[in-house]
Amino acid sequence: MRNPIKFGLVAALAASVSASAAMADTVKIAFIDPLSGPFAGTGTNGLHQYEFAADRLVNEAGGVLGGDMFEIVAFDNKISPKESLIQLQVAIDQGIRYIAQGNSSGVANALTEAIEKHNRRNPDDRVLFLNYSAVDPALTNDKCNFWHFRFDANADIKMDALTDVMAGDDSIKKVYIIGQDYSFGKAVAAAAVKNISEKRPDIEIVGNELHPIGKVKDFTPYARKIVSSGADAVITGNWGADMLGLGKSVLENGYTGPIFTYYAAADGITAAFGETGKGSLRLVAEGQINPPVSMRATEYYNAFKEKYPEGNISQARITNVIEMLAKAINEAGSATDVVAVANALEGMEHEGLWGGKMMMRPQDHQLIQDVHIHAHTDDGITFDYDNSGFGLVVENTVTMAAMDSPTTCEMKRP
Amino acid sequence: MDLILVNIIDGLVTGLLLFMLSAGLTLIFSMMGVLNFAHASFYMLGAYFAYQISLALGFWMGLLIAPLIVGVMGAGVERYGLRRVHQYGHVPELIFTFGLALLIEELVQFIWGKNQMPYQVPDVLNFTAFAIAGNSIPAYKIFMIFISVAIFIGLLYVLTRTRVGMIIQAALSYPRTVESLGHNVPLIFMGVFGVGTALAGVAGVIAGPVLGTFPGMAFVLGSIVFVTIVIGGLGSLWGALVASLLIGWVTTFAKSYNIAMSDILNGIGFSTPENLSDSLWRDLWTVTSPQIADILPYILMVLILIFRPYGLFGKRDA
């Protein structure tokens, strides 16, 4: 071995082969999400949260089934449904039984269909789909199947909670709805109109508008319309640059009321809003970060920050995915019999790391949990986002939101 | 009525911002015949540099230093990149600037990441200058207007009243003659390229805090800048100004008022088809002005190209 680099490579290869041989009993979870391209930031942050949750909540506690370790295997889907299906096949070929995905409902729709087909045709190596973020209501309604489990509250549930809070605020008389011109933006607008007209028929919807997604340079004209409509509240499902652009523009041009949002936090948005967003920005989500609910949650967040100083726990539900999966595997007594694991997950009740009871509703595999309305502020923030001093504090909580909400799901069980 | 005044101010801000980008681009294009695809990338670099400088030295130093750095980089790109590619003709130049745009975007993502940067309006300008019927005009917007107008007057003075400007104008039309008179034309080219990119840098510095500082900011402005210089006429500073303001006002007004296509069509004598949802023309009838606001400049460009191919203020055929 004259070439030290070559020797090193061979040694590393040998080590990795022997390592994987020694850890034959790992439970692998495929993480299929964007790790390159414009949404890589969100995807990478999610991957870190998964790896950390698996290590801290499962592996350091001795694993599942008396010693099997969780391992997160990352696959880059470039947020494309087509690419996701290829990565799904690669994951299945590697013998992975658990698929985690969250960014984009378009991808989730493609995956859930492909997984159902695969499981029907290959009863010997079935897989489960752990959807941790895709919130299209159809996934647990018309398009539901036995293999899909959603750990985030869907768009309808979030809007239900949001409008519950709005309905209790008598100062709100006029509402302006604005969103991006695509399926999710339209779903948010439709849910908002439906909920508001049911709960507070006296509220006037003074604007319901869609704008091109990712193409608006300057939101000032939209902001002027919102201000001159006399709206007391704004509802938007915008995310990314569109959220920041709209929010800043509306606030800088004289609007002072609340802006109810889905995704106005973390990934640089919290820091960019800073002082401007204080007092106006509201965000509906599960998972209470501030104030911390327990010593355990505080320690967990501190340990995460130590490992990823630039990171945020922006998707608290990821810990629920890991904990509930571990519990289900232990209950089923097997990590390879995914039907038994799915049956254990179905109807499972769980006490989350971030507080509150939750239950995986058996009818449609939608996790029913507490949904919070957060406020963007720098007061009473224990754990900020983007190291900016600003973060989200829980203002209102709807416990077990939409527990009795109807579903059109007709689950076929194997 | 009040809203009209507000929209005029908003459109002015948008238009002047566009002008700062297109002024540099139109000079570069008319002088070297290069469509600089990376122009908007220099705008983005301006915003990012200014953000980085503002963290250490505050906003004002950022406004001062960042455009200088961007200008020096632009001059360097001309001296060591474009000038070498120039001998192979226009297509390699185009491809070079296009590649540069991609490179800068990747570089920005590599250094600053993909997230939004918290680049904020400075505290001294973070107040409402005045309000018109509840619509507040932030002081920062007034500041943007002043900066852009000052730059326009400065440019106009240099180009029309000074010796440097005369040489530049001569080099625009007759580079060979100017060269044989003993002037260093490549140096002039480098200077113009540097100043043009520095202007884009200034635009980035002052737009970053209001329009957001993120890796996609070059992309959203990239194509509209070319539209501006085509409408205005290549090489004309006045043309760039008029076209920028026109685009600023057209898009602002189109977005602010929900003018429905069905009203216009009814107004000029067409009646709405009875079963609209089955009609072949459904999409046309249901269009509203905010939906098409951002493509109006492109329609304007097509019309200009048909009826006045050298642009509003262009002096020669494009």
Image (cartoon, rainbow, N blue to C red):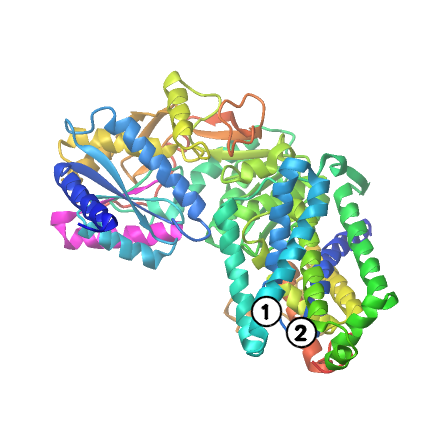
Residue B82 numbered mark, or none? 1
Left or right of B264 on screen, residue A142: left
Q: Of marks 2 and 1, which one's residue comes earlier in the chain?
A: 2
- Look at label 2 and name its amino acid: Met
Query: Percent x, y for residue B43?
Result: 64, 55
Disc 1 chain ID: B
Q: Residue furthest top?
A: A295
Q: Residue at x 74, y 58 (%)?
A: B15
Left or right of A409 on screen, residue A252: right
Judge by depth and name the residue closer to the eye, A85 or B272: A85
- The answer to whether residue A128 is magenta is yes
Distance from the alpha carbon under mark 2 to that under mark 1: 10 Å
- Look at label 1 and name its amino acid: Leu
In which quadrant is the C terminus of chain A drawn?
top left
| Disc 2 packing (10 Å; few <14; some 14–19; many ≥20) | some
Name the residue that disc number 2 marks: B32
Q: Bounds of the magenta span?
A: A105-132
- The answer to whether residue B126 is magenta is no
Disc 2 chain ID: B
Left or right of B222 on screen, residue B237: right
